[in-house]
Amino acid sequence: MVVKGVVNIGEKIEVVVQERLNADEKACFSMIQDVPQDDELWITMPMLKGEPVVLSIGQRVRINFFRERGKFYFDAEVIDRERTDTVHLIRLKQVSPIHRLQRRNFYRLKINLPVGFQVIKEGSDQGEVNYLKAYTADISGGGMRLLTDEKLEPGQQLKCRIPLGEKDFLELKGLVVRVVPCVERNYKFEVGVKFVDILEVEQDRLIGFIFQQQRRLKAKGLI
């Protein structure tokens, strides 16, 4: 599959750059300016924390873009550069098919979200849910790390209420997989939670929300 017809002019993307062998990859912010060929696109010079990231002719990068169904990516090569009066542009050629990020490779975002949870007691009627309060240390499409003063035990099942907007919540079932003393902040426990019995549509909504928050934080130079 080629990029033309899949990505859109004006769309925000990530450009993943590895500057040298064995160096850490850096995910930079950019925007699509034009799609002149089926397998080519012009993008703005990538930015990282407000600073431009210079790309060289022949350099390979990975392009990440996002849809409601999750995260997609393809490899590209820098084939041209151009400077106008207002912007630096990079021309890329697609050199791999478009792939969807595999579920086991969920991106984990460090963010503090207020989460409500309740321990599910086997054989009992939960009735009206009275949620206990916690905050995420990080979250992904597969689970989250909670900060709380409530003592939980590995193996317990939770009903979790995750905010996706001012009046929009996602209710998911979670399994406690790890409980350790909290050393990061002023909470007693750090709790690792794995989402279970999650529907694909719910997971896609969560992934879409996570990448929306990631783009917002990057635009502010916070990550």
Image: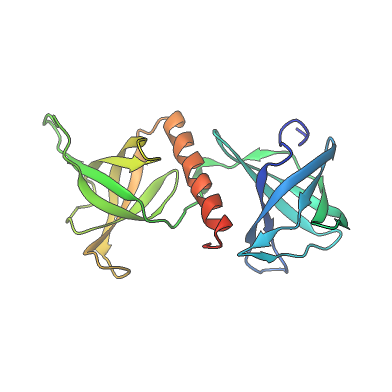
- The answer to whether residue 87 is above or below residue 199 is below
Q: In this view, does 81 lie to the left or right of 31?
A: right
Q: Place residue 19 in its image quadrant.
A: bottom right
Q: Where is residue 31 in the image (x, y as percent from the top left)?
A: 70, 48
- Compare residues 158 and 128 and report the one nearer the observer: 128
- The answer to whether residue 20 is above or below residue 125 is below
Q: Place residue 81 in its image quadrant.
A: bottom right
Q: Where is residue 106 in the image (x, y as percent from the top left)?
A: 50, 47
Tell me the colour scheme of the image.
rainbow
Q: Where is residue 71 in the image (x, y as percent from the top left)?
A: 58, 41
Total marks shown come to 0
Q: Is residue 29 left or right of residue 213?
A: right
Seen as rendered, the residue at the extreme front is 85
Residue at 84% x, 35% y is 38
- The answer to whether residue 209 is above or below residue 222 is above
Q: Quadrant of the N terminus?
A: top right
Q: In this view, does 89 lie to the left or right of 16?
A: right
Residue at 56% x, 51% y is 215
- Compare residues 117 and 106 and report the one nearer the observer: 117
- Compare residues 179 and 217 and report the one nearer the observer: 217
Residue at 74% x, 48% y is 75
Q: Place residue 111 in its image quadrant.
A: bottom left
Q: Where is residue 217 in the image (x, y as percent from the top left)?
A: 52, 56
